[in-house]
Image: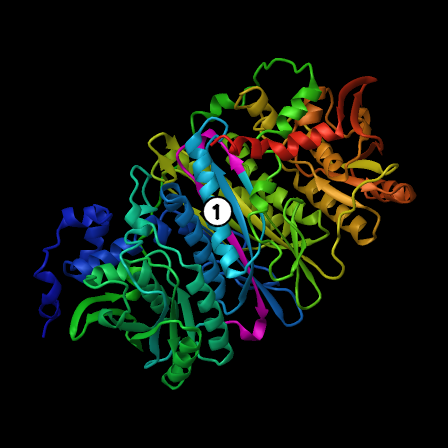
Amino acid sequence: MTFSESHGYERKIMKINEKIAIEHGLKKEEFNKIRELLKRVPNITELGIFSAMWNEHCSYKSSRFHLKKMHTKGKRVIQGPGENAGVIDIDDEDAIVFKIESHNHPSAVEPFGGAATGVGGVIREILSTGTRPIAILDGLRFGNIENDAHARWLFKNVVSGIADYGNCLGIPTISGEVEFDDCYKNYALVDVAAIGYGKKDRLIKNHANKGDLVVLIGGPTGRDGIGGSQFASVSLESEDRSAVQIPDPFIEKLIIETILEARNEKCINAMKDLGGGGLSCAISETAESLGIGIELDVDSVHTRESGLSPDEIMISESQERMLIITCKEKLSKLKQICDKFGVTCSTIGHVKNDKMMHVKKGKNTLALLPAEFVARAPLLDRKKTKPKYLRQIKKENNTKITLDYSKTILKLLSSPNISSKHWVFRQYDHEVGIRTVVKPGFDASVLRLDNGKFLSAKIDGNPKHCYLDPRHGAIGCFEEACRNVVCTGANPIGMVDHLQFGNPEDPEIFWTFMESLEGLTEYAKFLRIPCVGGKVSFYNETPLGPIKPTPLIGVLGIIDKTPFLPVSPINGDYLIIIGKTRDELGGSEYFEYIHKFIGGICPSVDFKDSKINMLAVLSLIKNKLVKSVHDCSKGGFAIAVSELSIFGNIGCNIDINNMPFVKNLSSEKILFSESHSRYLLVIDQKNIIRVKQFLSKKKISFAVLGKFSGDQINITYKSKKLVKITVDILQKRYFNGLEDLLKHG
C-alpha cells in the first residue's frame, strides 16, 4: 500500500491547498516548504500538527537563532535552556529547578482560568525534571486601574486565578510584582515562575529505547484549548474563548504525587508535560530531542467527550496531562501508582527507531512525519530598525518645578505602582509547606531548604525604562532583581527571563527585542550569572497597539548558612546610602505619575559599580554589621527611605547634601531619580565606625545621611527643609492606596 492510499481516511474529507494552510495559520512559504520536504501535500491531520508546531508560540522561529547568544554556561548549571526547566546545582546532593512561563492572551480573555492554567503549566514544567515544586512567583501587568474598570476586573480575577490554583496545590506564592500602564489597556501580561527542589540523583534524565511504551496520564483530552498556541501567536483582536484551557488543580495535585512516586520506582525513562501544541508538541519534541520515532494511536487517548476528530485530539491543549515513556516491564507498576492516586493512565503508543512521528487511528495512518522537521520550524531572519520615536523621547521635558515635595511623596506612595501590594499577597497562601522564611512584601523572599541552606528569589521588570531604552532598561531589570536578592544576603546564582514584545514582523519592535536580549547577555556574562531558562512572547498587541517592551527577569540567590532577617530601625540607628545618584529621571514614576511626562534619560547600570556594591553589601551582611538593607528603585530615594520608616514605624532625620551624586543635580532628581546599584543600610550605632571604615577601604560611593528617631521624616538639602511628613500619614497612604482603588470597581 502506498502512503497516499493509507491516508485515504483523511484525504477524502478535505483536499488541502494553500488557502486552507493559510487559514490554519501557516505562511505561504511554510506550506511550500512542507510540500517540498514531504514530496506531497500534507493531509488535514498533518496540517493541524504543523500549524500547532510552526506558530511563534511553539517554534520560536523569530527568536531561536538569537537566543543562542545568551550566557547559559556555569559551574552550577546542570540543565540549561531548551529543556523543560533549568536545573542548578546547589552543592551537596541537591538541585534547584527554575522556570518561567506566561499565559497572556488567555488571561486577557478569561482572566481567572487563563491565570490558573498558567500556574498549572509552569508547575508541570518543574515536575518534568522529577523534582517537587516548592514555590511560585508572579509578574503581572494591567492597564490603568485608576480610570479603567475593565483593568480592575482583569486584575482582580487574575490574582484570584493564581491564588485559587496555587492554594489548592498547596504550593506557596512567595513573591511577585504588579505594574499598571496604559499600554496594557484591555490586555494582561501574566507571568508565572516556579521553583522545584530535589536530589540530583533523582532527576529525570530523558532517554528511550525501541519498544518502550508511550503513556498519557492525567486529565482527559477535550476541545478546550484547541488552537491555544496559534491564538497566542497573533495579535489579540478577538475573544476566542475556545482557545482558553479549563484548569483543574485537584487533578494536578494528584499528578504531582503520582509522578514523584513513579520516579522513585524508576518507572519513568522520559517525560514531558502537555502545554502549547498539545500532543503534537509533546510527541514531536520528545522524539526529536531523543533521536527516536514514536507511534501513537488517537483511539487510545482518553477523552472528555465523544466525537473528537484526530486533528482535534492532536492539537488540544487540555490541561493537567503528562506524557511518559516507560519500559514494558514497568508499565504495570506505573498503572498501579496511577490507580493509587486516582489518575487516569492510557498507553497510547510505543517507541520506534525511525525518527518519525506516526499518528494512527487503529490501522489507518493519519500522519507520518519526520520528528525533527515538525519540531524545528524554519528560522526567520527578521529585519530590525531603530524606532523613530526614540529620536524625540529622550529630550527632557520642562516640567513644572515641584514646590511641595511632601505632597509629592504622599501622592507617589498611594499610586498603584508603588503602594503596598498586601491586597495581592494576602490572597496567596505564602506559608504553606513551612519553607517561607522571608515573606512577600520585602525586597525578595527567602525559602528554607532541607539541606540547611536558604534560597532567595525575586522577579522584576520595568516597561517604562525599557520603552525609553530597551538595552539599558532590560539590564536595569536584571540588576534590580539581583539587588533585591542581595538585600537578603544571598549570592545570585542563576536567572530566567521572559521577553515580551509586540509584533516581530515590525522591524522597530524586533529591534527593541534584540537590544533587550543583547543587554541581558552582556550583563549576565559580566556577573557570570547564567540564564537557565526563559521564554519569548511576541504578538502582545491589541487593536490599540503594541505593549511597551516588557522583559521580566527572575533571579535566584543562595544563602549557605544563616538567612539575613531584616530588623526594623530603632531610635539612634544610622542611615547609609551606597551608590551614586545620577541625572536619570527618564521613565521614573515621578515623571510619569506626577508630571504625566514620558521621556528623558533612562537609568543605566555601571557594571563595575554594580558588582562592587553588591559584594560590599554581601560582605556587610555576612559580618553582621547591618540591621537591614533596602534597594532604591521605583520612586527613587524618597520612596525607599519612606518605606523603611513605614515598616519600622519610626521617623528619620536626613540631610542629602552629602549624598553621592553627579554635579549640579537638582533636589527633585536627588529625591526621585531611579538610578541603579543603590542600597539603603540601617546601621546600629555600635557598628557605624566599622561600616564607614570598610566602605572607605573598598572605595565605595556612600554617605551617612542621618539617624532614625521620632515620628516623622525630615529631609534637608542645603539647610533647606524639603520634606516633613509624619510616619502615620505615610503608612495610611502606602497601605490604603491600592485597596481604596479596588473598592470602586
Q: Horizontally, is 420 left or right of 560 in the view? A: left
Compared to 569, does 525 lie above or below?
Answer: below
Q: Residue at x 42, y 70 (%)?
A: 271
Instruction: Give the structural element (helix, strand or loop) at label 1.
Output: helix
Instruction: Reply yes or no: does residue 731 show up in magenta.
Output: no
Q: Nearer the viewer, residue 49 or 264?
A: 264
Compared to 656, does 527 lie above or below?
Answer: below
- Whether residue 37 is visible, yes or no, is no
User: Where is residue 37 shown, x and y percent of the image?
Assistant: 21, 60
Quarter of the rendering occupied by the N terminus: bottom left
Q: Residue at x 38, y 75 (%)?
A: 325
Magenta part of the chain: 179-204
User: Where is residue 53 shown, x and y percent of the image?
Assistant: 30, 56
Compared to 207, does 698 lie above or below?
Answer: above
Q: Residue at x 47, y 36 (%)?
A: 142
Report the residue marked by disc 1: 160
Give the image quarter of residue 590. Answer: top right
